[in-house]
Image (cartoon, helix red, strand yellow):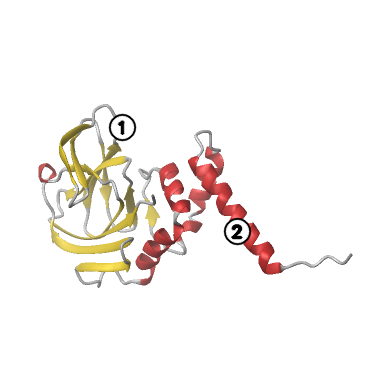
Amino acid sequence: MKKIFFPGLITLMFVMTFFVSYNALAQSSDANKEELSKWYQSREWLGGLKLAPHESINQTEFARQYFANRIWWDKAFEFLRTHDLESLEPGSYVIDPGNVNAYVSEAPTKEMDEINWETHVNTNDLQYIIKGKAKMGTILATDPTVKVKGEYNARSDSQAYSVENAKYYTAEPGTFFIFSPKEAHRPAFKMEGYDTVKKILIKIKVPK
């Protein structure tokens, strides 16, 4: 009996196998960290975007969410890749209605004490400094020094915290940060010598 091959079907099966295996890899507690790191370091998920992911990004959580609904992340990275960010006007931009939105601002930076530690339940924050420099703080929300402060604000999708022993990093052009619901963050506060910054915040919905 003559065998019939369907190239399109074979390709589809290969792609499905690829994504299922990586999705399982990202979600498994005993995931092969070496393979996950290899995929992450390849940066193929950036789709040609030349910006660099910051070292503080939670790679396992990012991979889990990326493969749960990669189209939202792909659209966020595509927006960064296809727009002249330096000339982009301040304001809000709908990238994928209800799922991915961008907010561009150019304004004086606030002092550290004016910026709350926070987490979000429904969105991830991708933060990128387009012009100038600022400081970013981040820490796992499960860290014992992270204490809930006040009530969850459903309108702004934010929970405030008081935090001790967090890490602070310099945010500057060329490198972006991602904060998932698993990380408390204190974003874009004033760095000495830089009174004004231009930044873009892209909110990517957390898949249910």
Seen at 44% across and 61% down, the residue is 71
**Image coordinates for residue 83, horizontal then vertical, percent:** 33, 71
Q: Residues within 10 Å of mark 1 (few under 14, many from 20)?
A: few
138 over 145 or under it: above or below: below
Q: How many marks?
A: 2
Specify the label residue 15 is tagged with.
2
- Distance, label 2 to label 1, CA atoms, is 35 Å
- Is residue 193 or residue 166 the one in the foreground? 166
Out of 16 and 203, give the one closest to the viewer. 16
Q: Nearer the viewer, residue 21 or 191?
A: 21
x, y (%) of residue 76? Answer: 37, 62
At x 49%, y 41%, the residue is 27
Q: Secondary structure at mark 1?
A: loop
Residue 82 to residue 23: above or below: below
In the depicted structure, whether residue 77 falls above or below residue 66: below
x, y percent for residue 39: 53, 49
Mark 2 / mark 1, whichever is N-terminal: 2
Report helix, strand or loop for mark 2.
Answer: helix
Q: Which residue is mark 1?
A: 142
Tell me which amino acid carries mark 1: Thr
Image position of 196 (left or right of 82): left
| Mark 2 residue crowding within 10 angstroms, few (<14) / some (14–19) / many (20+) | few
Dots 2, 1 in contact, CB < 8 A? no
The amino acid sitting under disc 2 is Val
Seen as rendered, the residue at the extreme top is 144
80 or 26: nearer the viewer: 26
